[in-house]
Amino acid sequence: MKRVLAESTSARGNVQPSPRSAKKLKLDNNAYKNGRTPLKTANGSFNSSQPKSQFEEEVLEKMSQDIEGLKKNNTERDQQWQRPPLDGFNEIRDSLCFQQIEAEEGVLHGGKATVKLFGVTQTGHSVLLHVTHFLHYFYVAAPVGFQKHDCDPYRMYLEGEYSKQFSNHGAAIASVQMTMKENMYGFQGNQKSPYLKITVTDPKVINRVRRTVQDGLANYKQLWKLQEGGILTFDNIQYVLRFMIDTKIAGMSWVEAPAGKYRMINPRDRHSNCQIEASVHFADLIAHPADGEWAKMAPLRVLSFDIECAGRKGIFPEAKVDPVIQIANVVTRYGEDKPFVRNVFCLDTCSPIVATKIFDFAEEREMLSKWRDFLEEVDPDVIIGYNISNFDFPYLLDRAEHLKIPKFPFWSRLKTVASKAVATNFSSKQMGNRDTKATNTNGRLQLDLLQLVQRDYQLRSYTLNAVCAHFLKEQKEDVHHSMITALHNGDANSRRRLAVYCLKDAYLPQRLLDKLMCLVNYTEMARVTGVPFNYLLARGQQVKFISQLFRKALEQSLVIPDLSNQASEDQYEGATVIEPKRGYYDVPVATLDFASLYPSIMQAHNLCYTTLLNKQSVEKLNLKKDDDYIVTPNGDLFCTTKVRKGLLSMILEELLGARKKAKRELAVETDPFKKAVLNGRQLALKISANSVYGITGATVGKLPCLAIASSTTSYGRQMIERTKEEVEKKYCIANGYSHDAEVIYGDTDSVMVKFGTTELAKAMELGQEAAEFVSGKFIKPIKLEFEKVYFPYLLINKKRYAGLYWTNPDKYDKMDSKGIETVRRDNCRLVQNVIETSLRMLLIDRDVIGAQEFVKETISDLLQNKVDLSNLVITKALTKSSDKDGKDGGYTAKQAHVELAERMKKRDAGSAPGLGDRVAYVIVKGAAGSKNFEKSEDPEYVLEHNLPIDTKYYLENQLAKPLGRIFEPILGEKKASQLLTGEHTRSISVAAPTMGGLMKFAKKTQTCMGCKKPLMSVTEKDGAVCENCRPRIGELYQKTLSKVSELEVRFARLWTQCQRCQGSIHCEVICSSRDCPIYYMRMKARKDVEDGGKELVRFDRDAALW
Amino acid sequence: MLEARLEQASLLKKVVDAIKDLVQDCNFDCNDSGIALQAMDNSHVALVSMMLRSDAFSPFRCDRNIALGINLGSLTKVLRAAQNDDNLTLKAEDAPDVVNLVFESVDSDRISEYDIKLMDIDQEHLGIPETEYAATISMPSAEFQRICRDLSALSESVSIECSKEGVKFNCQGDIGSGSVQLRSRTDVEKPATNVEIDMTEPVALTFSLKYLVNFCKASGLSDQVKLCLSNEVPLLVEYSLGNGGYLRFYLAPKIGDEE
């Protein structure tokens, strides 16, 4: 027990702000130089004194066994880095077919613009294909009087004006052609009109040429009438996208250069270190649509890595000072479930790790250069990691620059292009504002799992540990940075422990990637929308839609106007919400949903750019109302499908059709990898379909069209109202039904109907029938679907409800809750647990009394200080920075987490949370009348000093409202309020802190363990009980003893739990993960045992015994 | 079994009023010598210690030790129902769930009776050991209250300096500074206005005015207040409750720049 209690977690860190703090290590440089052990024969010696950790045993050894079975070789040494050799590849005989992963602009043979396609063949060879001769162009409407034969003179004229304008010499305009096209924006009466296609020689000049035309500076023969805003040009899109659209290449799809059509590039002239480098004319390139055979994935090499660097105490690692001490790498081929390369590059010696190659270096420069060589040799297609974009990449680059390793930053596939970290600010409505750093690795994709998870999932904490716990249901030990330092400064064995930790950090992103199927899903998104993979991460939503729109427009010879970006303040009405009839429903409530509401409205009513009409065009084209055109509830005019079918409606039809197909294939597919691909595809299709509406409503976007957006929502509103009417009209007693149906709530695309029947099966039947009945009233493809029944159902407010979710009458599927504290992040876990459990008891067990009892018990535990601290931690993101003086925060009102961050900075600047981190805090008791922001405190600080928790705050500000919302509809107001004030609240416990002004002086007076009387007299002072309670001493001793042994068992269990988690039963626990509930529990248990022990000792001194 | 009768309800009313802002829930420890209360405020800067000796009650009966855990907020509500000069009787069983309060009007036959549900308060019992103080000042409690109130308008803390000349209350604030000096004086006619300084060595300490102002709410309990100071030891502010009873406040000194 003694050893256990001596746990050395006194090194107090603060709230784990982000994964990066795990990277703050400390290294005492001198100690490292002098204390270096000369043990260099690490690879051969297996007599490590450390027991193997679970991670090693279960994960790494398994790998070795498998591979050993195949190769009969030493798995530590014989890991094959290179790609398979390029034997027998013949450019005359073999066609070059590969999956392209990235496309970028480039030049070949000094000048000619090309598109570089990077990719991998089925056999795992890396390819760079230069696609030549593709020229960029744009359109402008031909003015009246412009004749075919004017094309050439106009080209000369434009060329002249352009070179005058920009004093540029050399041909900029390749050609001017006259073609028949149609403007996409607005209905044109199905008439094509002449447009000029202006092709430029170099994509770099296109914007300047476009500007020349736009501004009317090349007004040939004064044919254009100048107007405000300039002359409208069409088809403004990037070169690479233009190329991909015109050649019908989608992102991450397969392309083929037929044998004999491409030319290999002379090794001397190669731009890259790809195995195959060739050039091809763009017209000879075959794009394979991602269907059937071509839905496959090439064996992409995925490198996952993690670095550890040695920071100084209290300071965030700076590349100029703090060395990188370890780099762990794991390389996996896509489709294989085990990495084929596992190694750790470390500074100083390191004992061997099973199935892992260790490279130890005496010098950091050497280690870094060797790591780069490794990177080039293993030639990964995708580089992943956790927080690599913002930490690992820039840190390595800066460090190498500081150490002057000139060769180091060449990570890209292009020989001459060095990787550079550039600070970027990414802001989008979906993701909010984010400062990031971007490092170019041309030809290699990057996936930062941290960014990915932050973007796609809402979690309480985004540390690697928390994310893994959430998705993989597995914890990793979180080594406090001061501990890492100690480990590194130890011997080869302790560094081995660090290496295992580092390796695990490198391996987990890979597992996350597999689990979340990011690569597959993003690949499918790229294929569906047709944009390169990188765009999906680096750019917003619009580019995906734009790419689809251009593709479709090209098919129909439509041109898309280049509308200048004018942000308009116009707001339009959103979706409708039927006022909820709040309450607790103990009868089945059926939910009727419109399937893909907005896409189906756009299809049904033919809402599109191409069908948009105005009054003038209606008159001009002599259209008939309702027959040829419709007026939307919003007052906009669109022509019907009879006149012209909308482009959007075609895109949507295709997307939804493709989704149906993917789903059908998914149902019959058995191969798990193909299944993953298909599932990813149907998801991507669904998202794309739903985003179409969003783009038309985005006023700052490229193609805003409020007429479409507001018409869509107005139809949506109308339909919800109509559904309500129809259902209530049909299902009533007057029509022979047993009850009057009632729509109790409706939101955007769903209505909740109480049919009145108490039978589940009956409600489902009615729901099904009603859905069909109402669907019949609307135009196809609008479809009302009966999806589920809630029974029972608790409707609290708009967008706040909970219920038991049934899809078949025999068994419920799950408990569903929306907008209730269970999912929100700005309250403590206690609230979440209490609400979830009581909902469960109320809805599933139908145990109202039990639920009340449970709530009471929890509250009483809270008041008696029995609740685990981790349950009381609240986290909030620190989003705005304070200015340099640290005085005036970006926040106007003082907030608890901001104030705490400031205070923590004063205590220890190094571990205090930084901007963008989530700050964890608990509310402690403060002086009378102090504000909440004065009472916030770091959970660890609270544990250490035994500060009393402000239970009242938790009761009144955290629990009261959500509990009231849930219980009031069921119990009524009066009874619900008793939950918070009843008998159970009369037992409280107040912790005595070890700090605070008076604690230095105060002396604790023992109280009698029987009756709480302070023991003042000399005879009683050190004892356990007072005179009066003396007869009870036996009973009280028994009680205390059993309590202490219970606590001891509890602590021992927690301790072994943590040992198991860290994977070594014989080592001390060094984990200090602040995301882990067990951590707090363990700390608390340790304290409890200590206190209990003290209490027990009092009996020894009690006078009654002697 | 506890039974304690107070001639004047106002005594308990004033005591509870004086401490309810510092302490929310606390145990009243009752034994044969009287009723005692000891509790620290939430931020652990001040400590309240109250002692009502059995002589203050007539009759007083307490067979064995009883701890009454009372929410002072609830107690205040109940005490509001009592007139200042009502007789007040506290009653409780040996292992009580409730404490019973009876108010008897002196001039009429009105008897009102209230029960307060008790709480089980698990709290460490902390006390400040008795020490010899370097300086003890007795002064009119109204005077002390006025000084604290006046100076709190300027600053958050006050330094109390005790020297041969007398006692000086000094504060520095953003808008300016202020000081009040008192010399010892004796007025035989009105002993309530006496200022007595008993000093063995000079003392200078700084305290939070917020707390001192809070302590001063007890001014109504006694004409005189006693301040006891020693360097680097908490300040003791004592109001006598008669019959050897007292209401004491301890306040930790401010050290250095610490807030």
Image (tube, coloured by chain):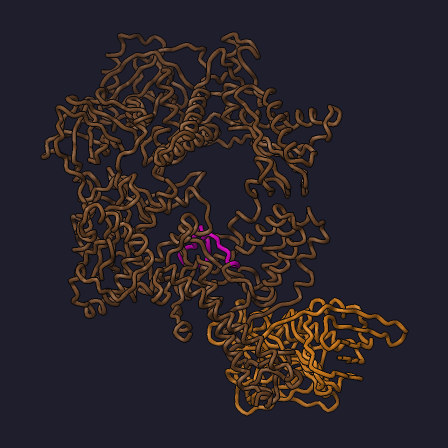
Residue A835 is situated, as x and y percent measured from the top left of the image, at: 59, 51
In this view, A452 is above or below A624: below
Boundaries of the magenta span:
A871-889
Q: Which quarter shows the N terminus of chain A?
A: bottom left
In this view, B250 is above or below A588: below
Q: Nearer the viewer, residue A1009 or B90?
A: A1009
Is residue A401 something that shows in the picture?
Answer: no
Which chain is tinted brown? Answer: A
Could you say which quadrant of the image residue A725 lies in?
top right
Identified at 35% across, 43% down, the residue is A514
Residue A511 is situated, as x and y percent measured from the top left of the image, at: 34, 46
Q: Is residue B159 left or right of residue A46?
A: right
Is A982 in the magenta?
no
Is A874 in the magenta?
yes
Identified at 42% across, 62% down, the residue is A1057
Which chain is tinted orange? Answer: B
Q: Nearer the viewer, residue A147 or B14?
A: B14
